[in-house]
Amino acid sequence: MFDKVLIANRGEIALRIHRACREMGIHTVAVHSTADEDAMHVRLADESVCIGPPSAARSYLNIPAIMAAAEITNADAIHPGYGFLSENAKFAEIVADHGITFIGPTAEHIRLMGDKIAAKDTVRRLGVPCVPGSDGAIDDEAEAARIAAEIGYPVLVKAAAGGGGRGMRVVKEPERLSAEIADARSEARNAFGDDAVYMEKYLSRPRHIEMQIIADAHGNVVHLGERDCSLQRRHQKVVEESPSPALNAREREEIGETVVKAISALGYLGVGTIEFLYEDGAFYFIEMNTRLQVEHPVTEMVTGIDLVREQIRIASGAPLSFTQKDVRFTGHAIECRINAEHPRTFMASPGQVTDYHQPGGLGVRVDSALYSGYRIPPYYDSLIAKLIVHGNTRNECLMRLRRALEEYVIGGITCTIPLLSDLVGNRDFVDGTYDIKWLEEYLSSLD
Ligand code: ADP
């Protein structure tokens, strides 16, 4: 097992990784920008190294600075968390070249799945159902028009290198097609430095359902069920739950078998998420994420499996500590993402947290790096806390979530708790009948 793990991230996920290491008897190294000197993960880690100024490009994305920190502290592994360098194949390669273990899949798998066109092509050949669309990049306008007519409008133009909901354009009619392709291309070029785009049928009212998988270096692959992440704003997840209120046991088993078969054939290593849209009883692959996800606690709560601990074990060469048959899904879990944003306008609201009291009690978990007196810096993602609740039934879970949100005090800043409280009381949410369009429509009905 590793002696020392460097955590190449910040905020709640850096703390989450630190906690897993600590429980495994592994020393931790925190890296941080000058804006994060007082961050909780820096305070708790065994060692810390300042890697640059506030701008992420010069700190958390600064590969030479992070590698220097790993060398100085003699870390034997690096955990990238999510975001930042977690899906950067070049970084995974550099880490390995330095004789340090990258806690994640191989650079080759990161690169393959980072190109959504190649990813789709690969999984389709492994028997995974995909959204109908252009089989590959669009390079010819006449060809694009022909494919769009064939799959039927509306269509969605997507960036091959896309992420975070960027580089996507819905095209409702043929007259708009070439303009929207040009727009998606320039957005993709600016955001990702790659202007390759492809096209998919725009599904009208799907749910977003993703499968968590985990694979070791000995050929064992296990799925840990699904997460329903249909409550989204601007293609970004706001609430996630497991199990999905929309799936039955047979569908869960079938899609589980399909993904395990594909992942085994790929020879994949580590944790991963296969994302699907689900409509009228059918699954359509959209992408695979080759990292730990923000919403992983939902799966941990229903399976009792510590995903970060398993990631670290697998990276060290150990086999999975369970088989598919050992995995038991118990009860229901829901996660709410709490952002330092205005609950209606979504304007960022960084600043000092004057009072802090987090909810507790049976079945309540808070993953957050906040504390009373902490100053939320304005430079990074606005996610400040994840509230995760577990209950024996979905209803118990909803009641618990309602009271946990009531208890939560984050003083001094504006955050999205009021919006989440409204959602938890909403009929459609309680009934579990929402889809990926629901939240946006709900928000505009409030205007
Ligand atoms: P990103 O990597 O930017 O997050 P994804 O491909 O994962 O992009 O898609 C993000 C979200 O965009 C999905 O959860 C869904 O809400 C929406 N979306 C993506 N593809 C489609 C599609 N073909 N039809 C309808 N909505 C889609």
Image (cartoon, helix red, strand yellow):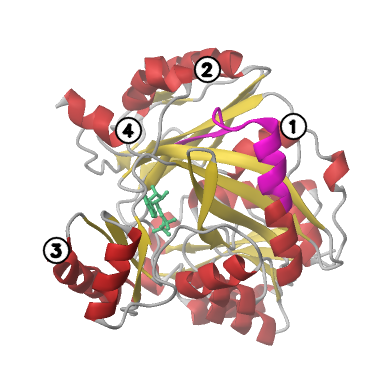
Foreground mark, 4 or 3, reads 3
Marked residue nearer the N-terminal end (2 or 1): 1
Marked residue nearer the N-terminal end (4 or 3): 3
Magenta span includes 158: no
* Quadrant of image for the N terminus: bottom right
Which residue position is annotated with label 1? 329
Q: Residue furthest bottom?
A: 97
In whole angstroms, how far apart are the C-alphas of marks 4 and 3? 26 Å
In whole angstroms, how far apart are the C-alphas of marks 4 and 2? 17 Å
For residue 333, above or below residue 38: above
Marked residue nearer the N-terminal end (4 or 2): 2
Mark linked to residue 63: none
In whole angstroms, how far apart are the C-alphas of marks 2 and 3? 43 Å
Magenta span includes 246: yes
Is the C-beta of the residue carrying label 3 under 8 Å from the nearest atom of ligand 1?
A: no
In whole angstroms, how far apart are the C-alphas of marks 3 and 1? 46 Å
Mark linked to residue 176: 3
Inspect the image, locate mark 4, and give the three-letter code of the amino acid beneath it: Leu
| Residue at x-position 80% and y-position 62% | 216
Mark linked to residue 398: 2
| Residue at x-position 19% and y-position 36% | 345
- State the SS at label 3: helix
Q: Position of residue 233 (x, y in %)?
A: 32, 41
Marked residue nearer the N-terminal end (3 or 1): 3
Quick one: 221 or 94, which is closer to the camera? 221
Quick one: 27 or 96, which is closer to the camera? 96
Inspect the image, locate mark 1, and give the three-letter code of the amino acid beneath it: Phe
| Residue at x-position 50% and y-position 55% | 10
Marked residue nearer the N-terminal end (2 or 3): 3
- State the SS at label 4: helix
